[in-house]
Amino acid sequence: MQFLSVRRIDRSFLRGLAVCVLGALPLRCIPAAHAQVLDNDIGSAPSIRVSTPLPAAAPLTTSVPPFSQPEALFPNPFGLTKYLRDRGVNFLFDNTNEFAGALTQPTPGFRNYRQGASNAGQYANELDINWEKLAGLTGFATHVITVGRYGTTANRMFGDWLDHASEDYGGGGNVAVHLVLAYGEETLLGGRVAIAAGRIPLASDFAASPLFCNFMNGSMCGRPKGITDSNYMPGYPASTWGFRVRGRPTRSTYIQTGVYPMENGIYAVAQHRTGFKFNGANILGYTIPVETGWEPVFAHGTLPGHYKVGAAALDEPMPDNLFDSDGRPYALSGRAPRMHSAGWESWVMFDQRIHHPKGGGKDAGITILTGITYNDPHTSLRNYVGYLAFLDRGFWPSRPFDTIGAAFTYTKIDRGVSLTDGYLMDVGKSLPNHATGIQGHAEVLEVNYAIHVCRGVVFQPVFEYYFNPNAQSNLRNATLLGFKSHIEIL
């Protein structure tokens, strides 16, 4: 069997590996009392704010919620970090690298498929400013995140276009600096109301959880892939103009909604390569999401949970996945698909820590995650996506910050897409969605072990298994081994 070939490893892997090795050399790389974990990195800050209930005795006085301050390799170089944070300025810089290589050979007969390895990753900057401290604007803060992404993803090598083997791939425009988000947020009534406006990735606030990126594959990390099934739904690192308001009627409940103009080509290089295109010339509709959640904390604060349900109305033109305007299959009539003026998406998500070891740290224990996203069956590719996962942190007393994880996702392709594939194959035409066979369902299994190497450094060996790549039964299942590394530099 042909194994991983060095010549097939993207050069970006070597750059990412160099960053990891050089970053781990200083003597500063020592154990810490509060260790870096993968659910507290750049990009997770919006979902962390959603997932944080009010304190037990929350005052009505307004203040800016604390900024994310993950453990870093260089926590306070030359005293600069403390100096800035004391004055309301929070700057973070990190690198995430994801490598995956196929152990199995791809399906024969496709000249573009091959066995090999790939590497993808990103470096990211986050700048949070507390204008209450800096300029006396009570409760007001701004948030900016930029990234630079590199590399490619291994799943394309064996014919899969549904779920990236490395989540940190795509959307970055292949530029040195890509704007992910830039918005202002006003907090009122002691955190009971939060209003935000600016360039915002909708899926960073809605259907979001910081726990998802304890995994590497794109069916889980970021958000369950069904949430961004529409070509216009902005998910990290893409964003649109947006307005969002969140209210917390009780300590452990919230409801949030917003209005997000949808832009054509949100993931395309032509329109959004750098993310700095701010005009609205390509706006073609609006998305209005609504989500409500319950965030209980059981067992004297050691067993937190998050239960949420939501939906989004998509007021934008979308093609039917089966019929033309006369109600006939467009694959047979040769006409354009029927256009719908609106669509919808929905989701139900739960996570609950079910065990906390005696004497374990604040984040230690076993957490179960499950949920489902369900989309408009007339316009979607993924009719629904379900997932089940677990995380166990601190299961070895001598390794209190290590985490073992397992996740399984199931993707059901909409019936209209499957029928269209069959009709097109019958008449010898090419299929949509990069398909080379009828799409039906796909599953992805991931098992990983995140090792807290030292302060600010996490290294995670990863096993991935793809059932029915690209939701096609004519493609061989694929086995991948790899790793994810995260270095919080500042």
Image: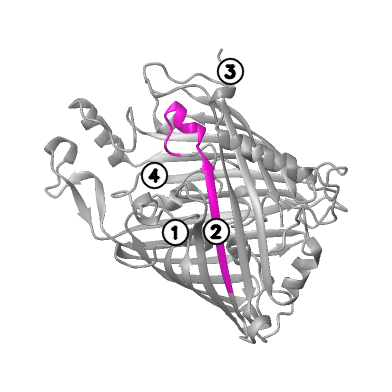
In the image, residue 334 above or below residue 63: above
Quadrant location of the C terminus in the rendered image = bottom right
Q: How crowded is mark 2: few (under 14 residues within 10 Å), some or many (20 or more)?
A: many
Instruction: Give the mark nearest the N terminus, 4 or 3.
Output: 3
> Which amino acid does the dot numbered 3 rest on?
Phe
Which colour style is shown?
A: one colour
Q: Mark 3 points at which residue?
A: 3
Find numbered disc 3 in the image and state the secondary structure of the residue it sits on: loop
Q: Give the range drawn in magenta.
A: 142-162
Find numbered disc 2 in the image and state the secondary structure of the residue it sits on: strand
In the image, residue 414 above or below residue 292: above
- Numbered label attached to residue 146: 2
In the image, residue 103 above or below residue 54: above
> Which amino acid does the dot numbered 4 rest on?
Arg
Q: Name the residue under label 1.
A: 275
- Numbered label attached to residue 188: none
The answer to whether the residue labelled 4 contacts the one labelled 2, judged by CB atoms less than 8 Å apart, is no
Per the model, the C-alpha gap separating discs 2 and 3 is: 36 Å
Per the model, the C-alpha gap separating discs 2 and 1 is: 9 Å
